[in-house]
Image: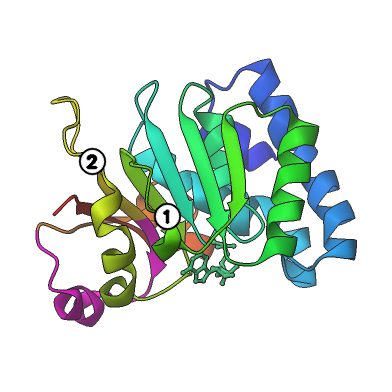
Amino acid sequence: MELIKKHFPALSEKQIAQFAQLKPLYTEWNEKVNVVSRKDIENLYERHVLHSLGIAKVFKFPENTDILDVGTGGGFPGIPLAIMFPESNFHLVDSTGKKIVVVKNICEALGLKNVVAEQIRAEAIKDRKYDFVVSRAVAQLKEFYPWVKHKFKPTTEVAYKSGLLYLKGGDLTTEIKESKLVKVRVHNLEKFFEPEFFETKKVVFVPRQ
Ligand SMILES: C[S@@+](CC[C@H](N)C(=O)[O-])C[C@H]1O[C@@H](n2cnc3c(N)ncnc32)[C@H](O)[C@@H]1O
């Protein structure tokens, strides 16, 4: 928790309280539904919360933007981002119903009003459009991008370019090449956080295309 405060010193009291609640909430829910490995519960803030917030180091979501988290699992990166950006709207989806039950309960306990969680496959979302898509550990870009390609709003504010912010690790040269996506930007998280956890971790930004 101290790491979160250190890296995001401008958090409000409310946000600090919400982040502090995550550890007891995940510890309790993980007993019922395994959403985080047992080992990782001990390192919840580094491995899951701070990692999710890597996206917030790279990009500040403007107010009233609509953000889709595909394959949110137990709520990553969506829940930490929804705490960080209370004026943006988050749609957290996963194909597994029991994970969405956990996400809904945790969001309710946190009093997060800017999150809607739903059991649905990304490909099945037809009627909604977003400014941004976020994700972590779901599929390779080549497979993933076609799921979300048509989910971006047709026009967005000139102040930002809509697109996908994907948390990835390792060498992405081959993956990006195979995806045939253009103008992809890779941000290294070790620039922002302690290298022990973050030396191979990155945020990949794919502008809408
Ligand atoms: C490895 S988990 C990652 C969960 C979370 N993003 C995280 O980083 O902790 C991958 C998740 O993606 C979900 N998933 C896979 N394909 C999906 C799809 N097409 N639409 C929605 N969810 C999907 C799975 O059910 C699973 O919960």
The amino acid at mark 1 is Ile
The residue under label 2 is: 162
Q: Quadrant of residue 186?
A: bottom left
Residue 68 placed where, x, y %?
Answer: 43, 46
Per the rendered image, the range of residues in magenta is: 166-182
Give coordinates of residue 187: x percent, y percent: 28, 54
Query: What's the amino acid at mark 2?
Result: Ser
- In depth, the one of 82 and 44 nearer the eye is 82
Which of marks 2 and 1 precedes in the sequence?
A: 1
Dot 2: element: loop
Left or right? Give the position of 68 relative to 160: right
Which image quarter is the N terminus in? top right
Examine the rendered structure and indicate whether residue 178 appears above or below residue 162: below
Is 169 a magenta residue?
A: yes
Check if mark 1's residue and mark 2's residue have beta carbons within 8 Å: no
| Residue 43, above or below 169 | above
Quadrant field for ligand 1: bottom right
Badge 1 density bin: few <14, some 14–19, many ≥20, Cα 10 Å: some
Does residue 201 appear in the picture of this structure?
no
User: Which corner quadrant holds the C terminus?
Assistant: bottom left
Q: Is residue 198 above or below residue 24?
A: below
- Which residue, as the protein is rendered here, is positioned at the far front? 127
> In the image, is residue 8 above or below residue 134?
above
Q: Residues within 10 Å of mark 2 (few under 14, many from 20)?
A: many
For label 1, the SS is loop
> Which residue lies under the disc numbered 1?
125
> Is label 1 or label 2 in front?
1
